[in-house]
């Protein structure tokens, strides 16, 4: 009876909802002009261009404000700021790696770009789009503020009033501030480098008065462990900006000879239909279909893979079949250049390394990565865990902080809800158990589910290592609300030696799949010693040998692992002067791309697991 009721509910319920964000998605299929390239800059640690000497925000037209022209009206006017080709930065790109004097810089830098623009059509609407700016961006065009955005890893856009955009010499200024604060997300303390700047693409977007702001089309959440039907049910929505009554929406998948016309019901029109027989997206055959969405005035298209994912009982089912996740955690960083990753070439490097290791899954830690990563994962058939930077000790008691975390969650899900590769939305990492924190996290889980009920929701939980018990239970109360109980454990690195693994077992009281979202130990490449010596390749390798042996004793709900981490990465917390020097050395690859001993141990385990599950 219960199953029948659930099945009926699933039929009625549209599991994909629109978030409170005006984000324009599928940006790559829009008519855009790139504003990437060389920008002039002013370093402003005291925020002189923003506040007056009494620390009040400057008036919009104030001559001292750095968003206003730097050209004096006449020779007598005093100007104490100016943009000049002597001072430039490349966009996209963090500032830290671009100039030696910016390596440790945390604060404000003003970016300025001049550009000309000839509209292609009369009556268009214009937006400025940023792939990501870390952390706070205040955006001004020709002396007027377009908006402010917080959150260093998610996209945003502001509409440009038509009267403001000129054909010649537009003066675009972005104040970028990457200072850390207790009440932001992430908070003051992280184990990664706080790269500042305009780190992803900047685009000017030209759109018709009424345009398709966002659309999503996914297979419906499966019913209780079932594989998708031969002609599967799909659902989603189309969101129109500037909707006019009487509009019709066309959804077309040419390869499937599928075409549906639906009258728009308002700004938001729900989609629900049966698709023709199709090839499911899978890790072996990551089939993508071009999906076209059209209205009378706008047309966009995206490449979408169709698959189902579900935590069912103690298993994770991909298209109805049990899945074992051979994962690896990845930071959005290219260690060879000591910089933030962006774009397809970087995605190719990182995902290519993961494939060489034998992975079918990556955990993109600890924040949403560049869109190129999730798009490439789609085309390579690599499953993705995508996370917001609710990391460690966020101010869980604050409603405002919850709002900031939700905004990032909304933007992450909205940007990527058509990516077949993404199977898990994670609402955070290693958050300390308390009722306040559990309410906070529960509220994020509820929001993630409201927006997207077709994927799993999880969070990387923390465990007590040295408990001295042979059975360690993952009984964090958050386990009740997640689909997948995921935990980070470092037995043999943070506490004890790796042979502790021989007498340790893991379990959970929740009747759910169990995933190890992190485990790892440090090694400096080329440092060889006996396996008891910390930071040697031998120690790290021994750690993996013992850990992977312990995995053989994992209970039946063990569905995978994503060790920490693909490559060594920069962290201000890692100050051993011999082995670390500002690097977290838990990588399978070092910062030059060399493989460590442990790489081969993990690779062998993944080969074994691949055989077992094929
Ligand atoms: C963790 C964190 C990760 C750290 C890692 C470490 O548990 O989730 O961000 O970098 O441990 O190396 O300590």
Image (spheres, grey):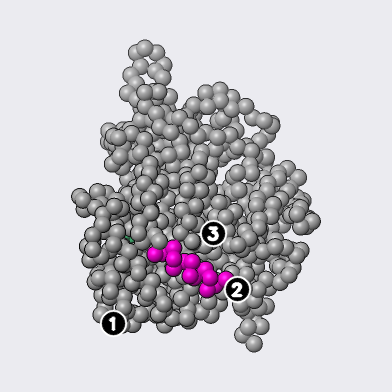
Which residue shows up at 47% across the image and 45% down it? Answer: 346
Q: Secondary structure at mark 3?
A: loop
Ligand 1 falls in quadrant: bottom left
Q: Secondary structure at mark 1?
A: loop
> Would you say the residues marked 1 and 3 are in contact, meaning their CB atoms lie under 8 Å apart?
no
Q: Which mark is residue 144?
A: none
Mark nearer the N terminus (2 vs 3): 2
Q: Nearer the viewer, residue 35 or 254?
A: 254
Q: Quadrant of residue 182?
A: bottom left
Q: How many marks?
A: 3
Is residue 258 covered in magenta?
Answer: no
Q: Position of residue 531 (x, y in %)?
A: 25, 65
Residue that carries the numbered disc 3 in the rendered image:
382
Q: Residue furthest top?
A: 75
Which residue shows up at 44% across the image and 63% down it? Answer: 603
Residue 319 seen in this snapshot: yes
Residue 370 seen in this snapshot: no
Mark nearer the N terminus (1 vs 3): 3
Q: Is mark 1 within 8 Å of ligand 1?
A: no
Mark nearer the N terminus (2 vs 1): 2
Magenta-highlighted residues: 601-614
Q: Residue furthest bottom?
A: 1
Q: Secondary structure at mark 2?
A: strand
Q: Quadrant of residue 585?
A: bottom left
Q: Position of residue 185 (x, y in %)?
A: 38, 55
User: Marks 2/3: CA distance?
Assistant: 16 Å
Residue that carries the numbered disc 2 in the rendered image:
321
Residue that carries the numbered disc 1 in the rendered image:
469
Badge 1: residue crowd in 10 Å (few <14, some 14–19, many ≥20):
few
From this view, report whether residue 29 is shown above or below residue 535: above
> Would you say the residues marked 2 and 3 are in contact, meaning their CB atoms lie under 8 Å apart?
no
């Amino acid at each position: 009876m219960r199953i029948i009721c659930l099945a009926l509910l699933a039929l009625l319920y549209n599991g994909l909802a629109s978030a409170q964000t005006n984000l324009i998605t599928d940006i790559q299929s829009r008519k855009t002009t790139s504003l990437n390239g060389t920008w002039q800059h002013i370093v402003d640690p005291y925020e002189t261009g923003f506040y007056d000497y009494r620390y009040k925000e400057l008036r919009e037209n104030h001559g001292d404000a750095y968003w206003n022209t730097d050209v004096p009206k006449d020779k007598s006017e005093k100007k104490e700021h100016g943009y000049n080709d002597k001072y430039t930065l490349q966009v996209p790109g963090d500032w830290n790696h671009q100039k030696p004097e910016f390596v440790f810089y945390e604060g404000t830098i003003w970016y300025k770009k001049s550009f000309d623009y000839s509209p292609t059509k009369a009556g268009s609407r214009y937006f400025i789009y940023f792939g990501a700016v870390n952390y706070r961006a205040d955006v001004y065009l020709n002396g007027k503020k377009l908006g402010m955005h917080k959150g260093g890893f998610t996209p945003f856009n502001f509409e440009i009033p038509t009267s403001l955009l000129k054909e010649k010499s537009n003066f675009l200024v972005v104040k970028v501030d990457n200072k850390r604060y207790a009440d932001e997300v992430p908070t003051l303390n992280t184990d990664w480098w706080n790269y500042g700047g305009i780190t992803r693409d900047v685009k000017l977007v030209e759109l018709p008065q009424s345009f398709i702001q966002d659309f999503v089309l996914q297979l419906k959440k499966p019913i209780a462990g079932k594989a998708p039907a031969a002609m599967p049910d799909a659902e989603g929505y189309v969101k129109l900006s500037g909707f006019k009554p009487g509009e019709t929406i066309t959804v077309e998948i040419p390869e499937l000879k599928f075409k549906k016309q639906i009258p728009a019901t308002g700004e938001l029109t729900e989609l629900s239909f049966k698709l023709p027989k199709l090839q499911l997206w899978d890790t072996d055959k990551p089939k993508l279909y071009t999906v076209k969405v059209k209205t009378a005035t706008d047309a966009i298209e995206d490449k979408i893979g169709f698959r189902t994912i579900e935590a069912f009982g103690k298993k994770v089912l991909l298209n109805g079949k049990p899945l074992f996740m051979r994962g690896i955690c990845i930071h959005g960083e290219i260690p060879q250049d000591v910089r933030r990753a962006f774009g397809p070439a970087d995605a190719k490097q990182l995902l290519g390394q993961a494939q060489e290791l034998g992975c079918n899954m990556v955990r993109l830690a600890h924040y949403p990565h560049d869109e190129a990563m999730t798009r490439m994962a789609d085309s390579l058939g690599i499953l993705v865990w995508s996370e917001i930077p609710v990391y460690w000790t966020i101010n869980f008691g604050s409603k405002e902080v919850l709002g900031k975390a939700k905004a990032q969650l909304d933007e992450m899900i909205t940007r990527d809800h058509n990516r077949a590769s993404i199977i898990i939305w994670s609402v955070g990492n290693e958050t300390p158990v308390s009722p306040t924190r559990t309410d906070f996290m529960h509220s994020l889980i509820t929001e993630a589910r409201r927006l997207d009920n077709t994927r799993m929701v999880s969070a990387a939980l923390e465990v007590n290592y040295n408990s001295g018990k042979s059975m360690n239970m993952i009984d964090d109360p958050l386990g009740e609300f997640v689909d997948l109980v995921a935990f980070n454990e470092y037995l043999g690195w943070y506490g004890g030696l790796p042979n502790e693994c021989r007498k340790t077992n893991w379990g959970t009281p929740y009747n759910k799949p169990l995933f190890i979202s992190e485990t790892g130990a440090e090694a400096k490449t080329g440092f060889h010693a006996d396996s008891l010596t910390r930071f040697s390749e031998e120690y790290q390798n021994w750690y993996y040998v013992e850990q992977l042996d312990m995995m053989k004793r994992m209970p039946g709900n063990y569905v995978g692992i994503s060790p920490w981490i693909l490559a060594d990465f920069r962290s201000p917390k890692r100050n051993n002067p011999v082995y670390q020097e500002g690097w977290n050395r838990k990588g399978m690859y070092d910062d030059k791309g060399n493989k460590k001993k442990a790489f081969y141990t993990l690779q062998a385990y993944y080969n074994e697991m691949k055989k077992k599950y094929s």
